[in-house]
Image (tube, rainbow, N blue to C red):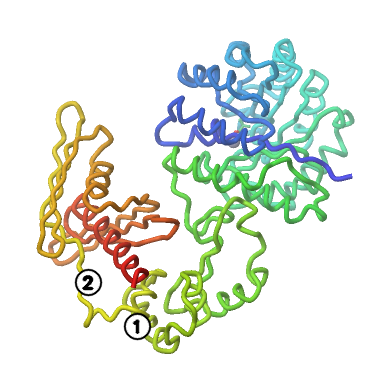
Amino acid sequence: MKKKIIILDTTLRDGEQALKASLTVKKKIKIALALENMGIDVIELGFPISSPGDFKSIQKISKIIKTSKICSLARCLEKDIDVAAEAMKYSNSFRIHLFLGTSDIHVQSKLRKNFSEIIEMAVSSIKRARQYTDDVEFSCEDAGRTSINNLCQIIKKAIKAGAKTINIPDTVGYTIPEKFSQIIREIREKVDNIDKSIISVHCHNDLGMAVANSICAIQAGARQIEGTINGIGERAGNAALEEVIMAISLHKKLLNAYTNIKHKEIYKTSQIVSQLCHMPIPINKAIVGSNAFSHSSGIHQDGVLKNKKNYEIIDPNSIGLKEVKLNLTSRSGRAAVKHYMKEMGYHQNEYDINQLYLNFLKLADKKGQVFDYDLEVLAFLDEKKEKFSYFKLKKFSIIVDNENNTTVSIRLLLQDKEYEASLTTDSGPIDGLYKVLKKLTNYCFTIQQCQLTFEKKGEKEIKKIDIIVNYNNRKFHGFGLTTDIIESIVYAMIDAINNIQRSEKIKKN
Ligand code: KIV
Ligand code: ZN
């Protein structure tokens, strides 16, 4: 029978403790709800003794979360345990997660105790936590560097004292897959009461092995995996749960395992965590990076168009992503160009593919990435003959008062006529600029990406802003190139608007 792997998410604890600034309660609630919606079995909400803010947020969230089990971290100290129980008392079922260093280095130089004292601390703390809940997890901190004999000794006592989950953290991301599997196997062989508990693993990514170690631990008998969304966490981070979950899903037969996670929620949850934590996702990040389902080379693009499975192991729809992307660059072949033209509703006899492809290659060499609307322009708009009228920036100003209200005014020129609008907002200059431009042009788009690059031109430092906006489910690019960041943003937005406008005009003709 397939074994269910319990997923414990520690984004709000191990993940949050690594952020530059703590999350507000409001943001933590949003993340907790997204995790619950995704089907996470156990959500570790925080470390309540660490700050009154953490305590309050745990208390608040514990009243909201209904289907996932909630959990709080505590050291093996009476006050930590009592505070953890207090923080979660509004929930009818919660877990207390105790941790204590077990490696020689932690025992001697951090805790300054001997191993018998460590065992005593663990046992009495587990017993105390059990007075509040049946669900107690015990973590042997730095298990990856703990001798197997000490590990087995303390685990046996912890289970006897009432721990239902035994967590084996590779706290410093030191182990490698074969070694980590061996630790789990030896624990299962040598600890005679191990069947009375669930073995969990908690891997850090210092050697880039966190996900591999977690998967190997499942093969060796672990039944719970701990990690964070997008792999955020101390130093190089924790095991990225979206990667672990999809690896289990793809290899369910080999691993003889499954999770209860709703895969369709993965992408959305990853975006929520990234945005609220201000932690951008690297474009090549597995599963959720913006390039994870993009194909660039002509051979790959042709292969994907013939059969997605040629170069895709995961259906992007299965994680809640709508599209597969073929990057239009100078490496793309005719197949990708034809594909995008078809996507935009053009039949092949409406344009000359050979001419279009030649022009596309020239543009791609000049511009780098080409967008679908660029193809429309190349195919249908002879810019030399047709006079296309673009919005041009005449003037803009931003004034912020002492109550943080921002007044934005913009004057645009279109076909020799000037248009001006202004408004006051409390949501900052960028939002103000966007709203005024919307008022002036009637284009309602959302900014999906905004990238700033610095370029040195002689003495001057140029701030280049590239934005990608979504307009009616299509992506449009805009860029601005000036010495001032805000001015570059204004130009980038206007450039995107002009691209939208031009594309609409071509469609109408
Ligand atoms: O990495 C670690 O050891 C931890 C424990 C508190 C489980 O985060
Ligand atoms: Zn950790």
**Residue 362, label in figure:** 1
- Looking at the figure, which quarter contains the C terminus? bottom left
Q: Amino acid at mark 2?
A: Phe
Tell me whether the residue at label 2 lies in contact with that at label 1, contact meaning CB atoms closer than 8 angstroms: no
What element does badge 2 sit on? loop
Residue labelled 1 has its Cβ within 8 Å of some atom of ligand 2: no
Front residue (pair 188, 408): 408
Of all residues shown, which one is farthest toward the front? 509
Say whether residue 173 is visible: no
Q: Position of residue 284 (x, y in %)?
A: 51, 59
- Looking at the figure, which quarter contains the N terminus? top right
Specify the quadrant of the image occupied by residue 488.
bottom left
Q: Position of residue 119 (x, y in %)?
A: 73, 21
What element does badge 1 sit on? helix
Front residue (pair 273, 411): 411
Q: Amino acid at mark 1?
A: Lys
Q: Is residue 99 above or below residue 284?
A: above
Front residue (pair 187, 362): 362
Q: Quadrant of ligand 1?
A: top right
Specify the quadrant of the image occupied by residue 311.
bottom right
Q: In this figure, which residue is indicated by the disc labeled 2?
A: 388
- Residue plotted at (80% across, 23% down): 157
Q: Is residue 92 above or below residue 168?
A: above
Viewed as shown, does residue 403 lie left or right of 123? Answer: left
